[in-house]
Amino acid sequence: MLGAVNGARLLFPDFSLILCGFLLCRFTPLSRPLWEQVEKLVYFFLFPVLLFQSIMRSPLDLGADAGLVAAGLGVGLTAIALSYACAVLPGVDRRDHAGAAQVAFRFNSFIGLALAERLGGARGLGLVAVLIGVCVPLFNVAAVWPMARHGRTHFGRALLRNPLILATGTGLAANLAGLRVPALLDPVLTRIGGTSLALGLLAAGAGLQLGSLARQRLLTTSVLAIRHLVSPLVAWTLARLLHLDAQQATILLLFSALPTASSAYVLASRMGFNGPHVAGLVTLSTLLGMASLPFALGLLG
C-alpha cells in the first residue's frame, strides 16, 4: 500500500511547481501578463492533448469492469451533487462557488496513472484508464455547467467551445471505436502532456492569492472535504456493496482520493471566474492528497 511518505514524495513535484510559479510571478520580471498567455496555451492546446492521450492510452473494456465503472460513476455523481449543494451554504458567494465546485470531483489523471501502474502493474493501469475514459467527459461537463449557468452562457455552446470537453469526447469515441495513437506520435503526445502538467501547475502558482481562501473559508473547507474525505468513504462503501475484487477496490479508492485536476485553475480563469481562489484550492488539494491517498488505501486494511 501507499504510505504517507511515498504519497508525499509523489506529490512533492506538483507542489514545488506551484510554489515556483508563485515566486516567479511575484519576484521576477515574469509577471501576470506572461502567465495569462501561458494559461491560453495550456487551455487551448496542451491540456486537451494530455486528456486525449490519457483516454487513448489503454483499451476500454466496459463490460468486464462494469462494477468498477458503476462505482466510479457513483463516487463522482455523489461528489458532483454535494459540490453543487455547497452553493446554498450561508455566506457562500455564488460566483466563487461556480468556479470552485469542480475541485470537489475532478482529479489529477497523471498522478492517477502513475500510482495505478505502481500499485497494480498493467492491470492497474488498465483499470484506472477505464475510470478516466468514463469519468473525465462527465466531470468536465459538470465543471462547465455551473460556470456557464452563472455566466448566462448557453450551455450547449459553452460545451462545444470548450477544448477540454472536445478532447475528452473525441478521445472516448476514438477509444471505443478501437483506434490507437500511432507509435510514432505517442512520444510526441507524451512530451506535450508532461509540458501541460508543468505549465498548468506553474500558472496556478502564478495566479495564487491566499486571501481568496480566507474570504471563502466555508466553501474552501466544503469542497476539499468532499474531495479528500467524503469521496474515499463513498468509494469504500461502494466497493463493498458491489463486491469489487481486491485490485478493482484498490484502484477505486486510489481514484477517489487523488488531488484535484491542475486544469481546474485554468478552466475557471479562462471562463472569467475567480481563478486565484481555485488556484489556492488546487494547492491545498495537492497537499491534502499526501494524507488522503494513504487514508483511502488504508480503508481496505
Image: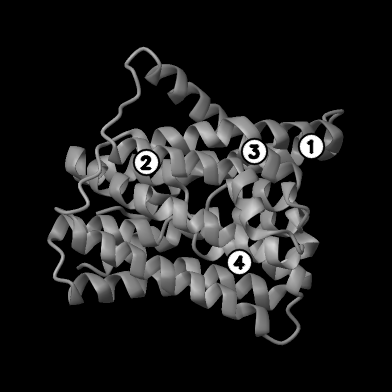
Colouring scheme, one of rainbow, by chain, secondary structure, one colour:
one colour
What residue does disc 1 label? 36
Task: Give the residue at x 53% y 57%.
Answer: 141
Label 2 or label 4, whichever lies nearer to me, is 2
Amino acid tagged 2: Ala
Depth check: give the residue in front, 30 or 168: 168
Amino acid tagged 1: Glu
Give the CA separation, mark 2 to mark 3: 21 Å
Task: Give the residue at x 58% y 59%.
Answer: 143
Give the CA separation, mark 3 to mark 4: 19 Å
Confirm or deny contact between disc 3 and disc 4 (CB under 8 A): no
Task: Give the residue at x 66% y 52%.
Answer: 158
Q: Secondary structure at mark 3?
A: helix
What residue does disc 3 label? 43
**Tag shown at residue 173:** 2
Confirm or deny contact between disc 4 and disc 1 (CB under 8 A): no
Q: Tag 1 or tag 4, which sits nearer the N-term? A: 1
Q: Is residue 174 left or right of residue 137?
A: left
* Image coords of residue 128 (percent x, y): 30, 48
Confirm or deny contact between disc 2 and disc 1 (CB under 8 A): no
Q: Secondary structure at mark 1?
A: helix
Depth check: give the residue in front, 170 or 87: 170
Quadrant, the N terminus: bottom left
**Label 4 Cα neighbours within 10 Å, binned few <14 / some 14-19 / many ≥20:** many
Amino acid tagged 4: Ala
* Image coords of residue 187 (percent x, y): 40, 18
Give the residue furthest to the bottom: 90
What residue does disc 4 label? 101
Quadrant, the C terminus: bottom left
**Label 2 Cα neighbours within 10 Å, binned few <14 / some 14-19 / many ≥20:** some
Q: In the rendered view, tell whether residue 91 sits above or below residue 244.
A: below
Confirm or deny contact between disc 1 and disc 3 (CB under 8 A): no
